[in-house]
Amino acid sequence: MSGAATTFSILLRPFARIAPLHRRRAGLLAITVAALAFPLLHDNDADIDAAANALAYATLALGLNIVVGFAGLLDLGYAAFFAIGAYAYGIATSFQVMPDWSPFWEPFAWLGLVAHVPGSGGPDQVHFTVSFWIMMPVSAVLAAGFGILFGAPTLRLKGDYLAIVTLGFGEIVPIVVRNWDSLTNGAMGLNGIAAPRLFGYRFGIDAEPYYYVAVGLVALLIFISTRLRDSRIGRAWMAIREDEIAAGAMGVNLVRLKLLAFAIGAGFAGMTGTFYVAKLQTATPEMFGFPVSVMILVMVVLGGIGSIWGVVVGAVLLQLLQSWFLQDLTQWIHALGRLIGMPLLLRIDLVQSIELIFGIILVVMMLYRREGLIPATRRAPALTFDQQHAEVRRGSTIALQGLGEGAKSPHPALEVRGVTVKFGGLTALKSVDITVPAGGVVAVIGPNGSGKSTLFNTITGLTHADAGRVKLYGTDILGLPPHEILALGAARTFQNIRLFPNLTVLENVLVGQHSRLRTGVLGAILHLPRTKAEEKRALEWVMEIVAVFGNRLMPRLNQTVNGLSYANRRRVEIARALASRPKLLLLDEPTAGMNPAETLELAEQIKGLHALGLTILLIEHKLDVVTNLADTVVVLDHGEKLTEGRPEVVRQNEDVITAYLGRNTAAGSAAFV
Amino acid sequence: MTTADLLLQQLINGLSLGAMYSLLALGFTLVYGILELINFAHFNVFMVGSFIAMWTLQMFGLTGQDVVMTGLPLIGVLLVTFAVTMTGSGVLGVVIERVSLRPLRNVKGPAAMITTIGVSYILFNLILLGVGADSKNFPNPLPQAELHFGDAVLRLREVLIWIVASVLMVGLWLFVQKSKMGKAMRATAQDPEAARMMGVVVDRVIVMAFFLGSALAGAGGLIFGLYYNFTSFIIGFTAGLRAFTAAVLGGIGNIPGAMAGGIIIGLIETMGGQFISTAWTDVIIFSILVLVLVFRPAGLFGRLAPSKS
């Protein structure tokens, strides 16, 4: 497979000197022209029909890609939404549901939504004649509504449960369709679904007009997908996919964004469903079962999970494979069988084996090429030796205006009062009181297992407290979800680093800005001046923060963080927390794993942040760092506060020495002091 | 039939189906407990198991229901068939783990689950292409011994199913609780890292979980054949989903929970089919799945195994 990729890059080499933006535009233009010219150059109705179907599946793959690829939610019942859009249009244009005529329908008839059918023997009847062009957006909204309905109860579950529940919904929808005869005509299926019309032109059974609608639909959905991916919303989805807990702690409203992904993905499918039945003019429950959901998943996996162009290519490839290539290949195999006299070969029918091929594609792709044919993330080239060993330039915090706002507050930055946390029989925190004055630096120290990280998790809403109160600048925050606590101004880092591994340094830090930006779905798609200005400001702020770390991160902005050194990942995490403009920064062992020079450098940078007025709560094991930075040290042991005071005083405290070094060494612990 | 007789009859049927779902649910629970992976391949390991059983019975010269055996020959044939089916299915499970899942052991995200869907599809289509789409007559050498309670009938095959399922479940329970390997499995389910450091060969534990789970699924496939007198490439999907619901109902990762969950699902299926409508059976069962997941994600009996994030 990588061999194929190499060949591909060799083919592209002559174009390497053209600027990337121009190359992309030229490529897009070429694809558009080819797509538009195809029916003119290749006048074969069956082939155009196959291409239109392929494009319909491409739109489905694009929708599923938002759910699975962007937000990382494995949806195995995606065809249900396809069915909902299909039946919505089917019912709104066929002769299945025909209420008796009454004056109530008069205005609808005037609008052209219904027609008055004279009854043959019985009373007059109503025939729904809603336009295809109206039903496209209506089906999208309807399916999106069902997306929210199905998603809402399940999104609190872990990802793998979501897969099975969506599978269940994917089964239920065809069952309901099969059993609700009066609305859907049951297993027989809806017939006589109207073909679309446009300005008096009737789409018939000719494939060409449908092909052009499909091209338009795919273009629209590629556009929407791209805009969403590159927006605040897309970044939040990918953050959820990479690390849900970190995403929540960085201000992403998990429930809302997951539902949004579900709704938009479902909307794409609903729209496609309408298109698909308008083209076929019939709908049966079998068209929307589990095999269809799997086929769309195979398209996404083949093309590249999360890759917009990848899933389009995957869908088109698989459809063309089914409608053209496999038939030809089967005939070749049969010819070969006759030629060499092997009757076994004559029994092979690859078109029948398509699902077997799907299964093999899934397994092979997962084992050997998980990123798909066209990977979503193109890795930035690694830094050269010279770049890596360039002079370490010191950063500065001068540009970070506004980070010290919290220091002016009349309230203490953080008041922890009587917080108790129990895990089963273990009391991790026992009635702990801590006060962090506005503008101060407080360090929490204590042996491993003393409850330091539990304290942080409780403050930031990740762990449920059994008793107590936590106030952030006078506001009660205990019990709030993590993203609200971040929005109120408490941002944190994690002891064992929770970055978004497959996102770049820039994207990671930008996620920290999430709660400070306002762009919604429409803003992201339309890219209005307001959105552009907001993105520009966000980028400027991120650049200023990254500059705090000198040239440690700056040259690596477009590298994915999983390739960074340990110390650099710590720096990215601090930068990500700073991006949210916190009023209280919680650092969980920021210098762990750093060498003495790096520790010194980071301590200096933290000091710089403090000098701006930023309030900091710090967990740290290196006591020289603690002494250097903190005004107050709080010592935890076995979940209880042992003592609190100025660093030099705490270091002499007998209890502290006992807790750290054991009873026997308490008397003469020169090494510790 | 009176309502009481109907109830009794559906209780008998439900317990038999439930025993089958329990055996299948145990495979989900064993693998999930250790790997936190929903193994979709399990659906069709069950289906393949029923075919292995059919072929084994055919090798004894049995083709339909007309050849009836009794006494020791019957017991011998059944024992051999169960042994062959369970070994075959178990080995299939181990091969699936070895070939398609072990390379993905440390890959985060849905890759492993997607792979199991792929494997499931491959098994499904291999059987479809190999034996065809029509359902196959499943050999059944059991004599027509019946007990009557009013209008309700208790057949020999039901008693047999109950005995076999009970023996297998008690055996599994003893294995997990008493044997050294069982202790290693329980330790790995709690914390694979710690288990590894204490000398547990985690790979061997995982292989064992796949072997046992798949062997039980194979037994379930044999029971399916004896109960319905047919088998087909298509049986894995519905039975698998119901059994998965059973595992969730009992608290996934919880072995007695999976047994109880299977029985409950079996009873819901037969009672719902009798008193509501068979057309809505799956809707009822999925509604239960969703309700349990939303309101009691730890299942009716179990608390969730500690998460290994």
Image: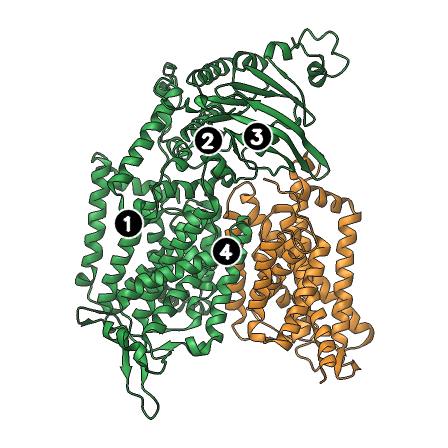
Chain colours: A green, B orange
Which kind of residue does numbered mark 1 sit on? Phe
Q: Which of these two is toward me, A189 or A486?
A: A486
In the rendered image, the vertical position of residue A412 relative to residue B97, given as above or below = above
Q: Give the CA separation, mark 2 to mark 1.
A: 35 Å
The kind of secondary structure element at disc 3 is helix
Q: Nearer the viewer, mark 4 or mark 1?
A: 1
Within 10 angstroms of label 1, few (less than 14), some, or many (20 or more) residues?
A: some
Which kind of residue does numbered mark 4 sit on? Gly
Tell me where residue A239 sits by quadrant. Answer: top left
Q: Give the CA separation, mark 4 to mark 3.
A: 42 Å
Which kind of residue does numbered mark 3 sit on? Phe
Q: Where's residue A123, x and y in %?
A: 34, 88
Tell me where residue B197 sits by quadrant. Answer: top right
Which kind of residue does numbered mark 2 sit on? Gly
In the rendered image, the vertical position of residue B28 relative to residue A540, given as above or below = below
Q: Where's residue A267, x and y in %?
A: 37, 58
**Residue B270, label in figure:** none
Q: Which of these two is toward me, A347 or A557?
A: A557
Kindly indicate whether the residues beneath marks 2 and 1 are on one polypeptide chain: yes
The kind of secondary structure element at disc 1 is helix
Q: Give the CA separation, mark 4 to mark 1.
A: 31 Å
Kindly indicate whether the residues beneath marks 4 and 1 are on one polypeptide chain: no
- Count of numbered circles in the view: 4
Q: Nearer the viewer, mark 4 or mark 3?
A: 3
Within 10 angstroms of label 2, few (less than 14), some, or many (20 or more) residues?
A: many
Q: From the image, tell me which residue sits under label 3.
A: A456
**Residue A489, label in figure:** 2
Dot 4: chain letter: B
Q: Nearer the viewer, mark 2 or mark 1?
A: 2
**Residue B118, label in figure:** 4
Within 10 angstroms of label 4, few (less than 14), some, or many (20 or more) residues?
A: many
